[in-house]
Structure formats: C-alpha cells, structure tokens
Amino acid sequence: MKRVFTIITLMVVLINQGFAQDDEFVPSGSGFATIFANFHQGVTNASSDESAFELVRGYLGYEYNFSPNFYAKINLDIGSPEDLSDYAKERRYAYFKNAYLRYTEGKLQVEFGLIGLKQFKQMEKVWERRYLMKTFADEYKLGSSADLGVNFNYKVSDSWDVDFTIMNGEGYNNIQTDGIFKYALGTTIKLPKNFTSRFYYDMTNDEVVQSTYHIFISYDFNGKANLGGEGIYRENDDWDEGYERYGYSLYGKYNLNKKYQLFARYDVISSNKVEGEENPWNLAKDGSALVAGIQFTPIKNIKFALNYHDWVPYAANAKTDAFIYLNLEVKL
C-alpha cells in the first residue's frame, strides 16, 4: 500500500505543476489508423496447402495535446489474439492497445494507464517492419508490447536516458487484480550518435521470482544501412523454477534508394534441459526463423514488402514451414 500511495502522491504533485502552462498554447488533437494485410503462399510440403489473403490487424485511435505538459492517447487494436478463441481470425476482436495520459516536465516524462512499453518501442523503431513480424520478445511470448501501469522516464543527457516501470505484468489483454506487479528498469545510451544500446531487466515475484534480461544494440551507417541485434534470457519462465528460455535476433536493412529497401532478420529461440529430462522442456516451440525480402514505398505512409519467411523447428519430428509473403502497411 505504501508504494501505491507514493506513486499517486508523486503524480498529483507533477499534475499540479503542469497546470502552470503557457497561455498561448492551443489544444489540438487528431485521429489515426493503421492497417496490416498480406497474401501468403506456402512453399514446402508442410505448408503448401496454405494460401490466403489476410487482414492481420487494424489500429484506430485518437491523440490529444491538452497543454505543453499533458498528452493523451487511445488506441483500439482490431486483430486476432490467439488466446481469445480458436476462431479469432474469422471473427475479429477489438480491444484497447493503449489508453494513457502522459505528463512531461523538463527532462522527466511520466505515462499512466494502458501504456506502450519502451522496451518494445525501441526495437520496433529499428526493425521498422511490425507489419511483417513482431519484435523478438513479443513474437516469442517473452513480454508484452503494452501493459497497465506507470512509467517514469528521465533524460539524463542528449545521449542517455533511464526508465522505471511498474505494471501488472499480464499484458494488455488481461486486467490483473491479484496484487502482484512486474518491476522493470531500463537504460538507453546513444553514444556515439549513430550507435544505440539498451539494457533492460524486469522481475515478478510470485513465490518464485521470474526475471528477464535483455540487451539491444544498433548501428546506423549514415542513413544508408542499419544493423541491429538483441539477446534475451528468461529465468524461471512462467514462475517454474529452473525453467529457462533464451535466444537472439539479428536484423539489418540497406536502402537502395528512397523507395526500395532490402532487409533480413534471423531469430533463434531455445529452452534448457531440466533435471531428469533428455530434451529441452520447451522443444516443441524451440527453433529458428528467417525473414528476408524487399520493401517498396511508393508514397509516404504506404509500404509493400515481398519476402520469404520460414520457421525451422528443433524437434526432429517437426516439419519446416516456409512461405512467400506480400505484406501491406497503410497509415492514415
């Protein structure tokens, strides 16, 4: 109770300070929408029968600037979360992806509500192709891209910031009421200017402590090309002591010109062997993935990507899935 009271008190103080605003500021807002769609065709025996046009997801939202200090955003995600129904892809579901208030004062920024997590924002910014595939931790269920909670971000300098988050830890599809929170601490360093590194740690204590360690690095070659990589280690996965998951993701891009871009990504996800077992405990979901292709941007806010996408499982009795995709992203 003390920690909750402290957080509320701090936010009230910040809000009171924020009302001392510039009289010349004109409040304003705008709506936005994003669409992800694709056509895919299987190219291996295991996936050759799968061929379809698919509307993967759509975002509808509105953002509003109340003052130089206060900003709010609400974002509806219309998609097909796997944990809702076996028929989700056919039926579609709408749910809140973001709904939060942001307060900014000098070098401090505070977000409260259903917030997008900085850990995923940084990776998506470099990967640039959320409409093809989620970032590593999100793709393999090692974290959620948004959650209910509060985030404090402090900009120490132009090249260094630190952030601290208290959240439910259940993601944006679940409203937790059990009083167990996830605590996360991260820092982003941009030094030199075209080199970005991020270090992150989170923990949740539910009889057993589940911890996640995440490191990310990225190097930009004068806007012409970019290389990025991240590694992740999860200890006591799903609060099962001794059960570990770990892996890495490498990705890069090369701009042929303003409209065409080559890209590639390679993922590896694994689990450990627990005592008394011959195989890794999560072998059925261990494996590697490759995505590679070319992106075409005819005009601003419209992207097409022709790409190859496969999944190579580590289990000896499992088959490789491989597809040719034509993906589309439209931002309104």
Image (cartoon, rainbow, N blue to C red):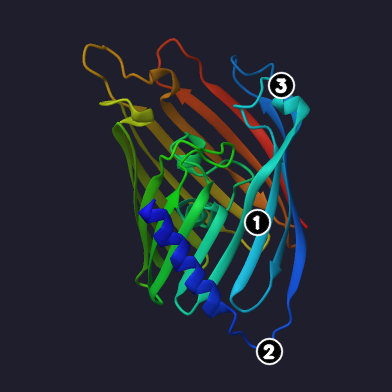
Q: In the picture provided, is 237 more to the left or to the right than 32?
A: left
In this figure, which residue is indicated by the disc labeled 2? 23
Residue 257 visible? The answer is yes
Q: Residues within 10 Å of mark 3 (few under 14, many from 20)?
A: few
Q: Quick one: 237 or 55, which is closer to the camera?
A: 237
- Where disc 3 sits, the SS reads loop
Amino acid, disc 2? Asp
In this figure, which residue is indicated by the disc labeled 1? 260
Q: Position of residue 140 (x, y in %)?
A: 47, 34
Amino acid, disc 3? Tyr
Q: In the picture provided, is 145 more to the left or to the right than 279?
A: right
Q: Position of residue 106 (x, y in %)?
A: 47, 80
Q: Residues within 10 Å of mark 1 (few under 14, many from 20)?
A: some
Residue 327 visible? The answer is no
Q: In the picture provided, is 41 more to the left or to the right than 153?
A: right
- Where disc 1 sits, the SS reads strand
Q: Quadrant of residue 54?
A: top right
In this figure, which residue is indicated by the disc labeled 3? 87
Inter-mark Cα distance, 3 to 1: 37 Å
- For marks 1 and 2, give the one nearer the viewer: 2
Inter-mark Cα distance, 1 to 2: 45 Å
Q: Position of residue 219 (x, y in %)?
A: 41, 61
Which residue is at 52% across, 67% downward? 223
- Where disc 2 sits, the SS reads loop
- For marks 2 and 3, give the one nearer the viewer: 2
Q: Residues within 10 Å of mark 2 (few under 14, many from 20)?
A: few
- Say if 34 sits above or below 206 in the image: below
Q: Quick one: 116 or 300, which is closer to the camera?
A: 116
Query: Which numbered disc, 3 or 1, marks the residue that appears first in the sequence?
Result: 3
Amino acid, disc 1? Tyr
Q: Position of residue 241 (x, y in %)?
A: 27, 26
